[in-house]
Image (cartoon, rainbow, N blue to C red):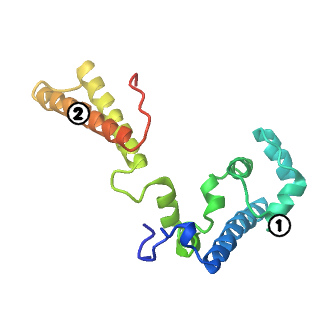
Amino acid sequence: MFGNTNRSITRSLSQATPDILFGMSNWVDEVASRIGREVAKLRGERSGQWLSDQTAAVGKRISKASISEIENGKRKSVSVADLMVLAAALEVPPIVLLFPGIPDGNLEVLPGRDTDAWSAVEWFVGEDKRDSLPKLVRHRNTTARRLKEHELHVKYGKVSPSDLGKFNDLIESYKRWIDEDEEKMRAAGGTVDDER
């Protein structure tokens, strides 16, 4: 996790010393400030009222005063809901606000854990593991598209008789791979629609 960083962060709060707790408090404040700076940067020359109106259009108005507090680091935290609404209003993925500087910017992703922004993104969405849910979904969806293409080629006679056996073998392999991916997705905590 997080490239070459070897420091452990698994210490429990009961074992945490005051300096660690203070550092954690600073980190929480820094995350909120980081989000605020990125909101201000992306808002640019447009007014706080403009952004407030944009958030209302998304479905949850964030007041001009609250936006100012977020941008100026006066808020000690930003809720997940506000993060998502601000991102939608600014027409960027929420991850851009959370981990600015993608791909190479450096940031403190967890207390005492510095890394580049792209490694933080990969960790956040689970891409840092071989059988991560996002990778499995992508592989399953790609395989399903290929399966459909091959089935259509066979159905509409676009396959020569000499290649028909190969196509049918591929179709069976695709079905098996999809089943394997979906089994792994369930094991990773994903929800798979069996009607798919």
Seen in the image, is 162 located left or right of residue 38? left
Residue 129 vertical placement versus 5 (above, below) = above
Q: Is residue 16 visible?
A: yes
Q: Residue 74: which numbered mark, if any?
A: 1
Label drawn at residue 176? 2
Of the numbered discs 1 and 2, the one sitting upstream in the chain is 1
Label 1–label 2 contact, CB within 8 A = no
Residue 137, percent from left and from top: 40, 42
Residue 24, label in figure: none
Could you tell me the amino acid type at mark 1? Lys
Q: Residue furthest front?
A: 14
The total number of labels drawn is 2
Q: Outermost residue, bottom direction?
A: 19
Residue 69 position (above or below residue 132): below
Residue 142 seen anywhere in this rendered image of the structure:
no
Along the line of sight, which residue is nearer the eye, 146 or 109? 109
Query: For the point 56% across and 76% down, which residue is it?
Result: 112
Place residue 71 in its image quadrant: bottom right
x and y percentages locating residue 41 in the rendered image: 75, 65
Mark 1 vs mark 2: in front: 1
The foreground one among 148 and 25 is 25
Which element type, helix, strand or loop, lies under badge 2?
helix
Q: Count residues near mark 2 (Cα–Cα under 10 Å), then give few for <14, some for 14-19, many for 20+.
A: few
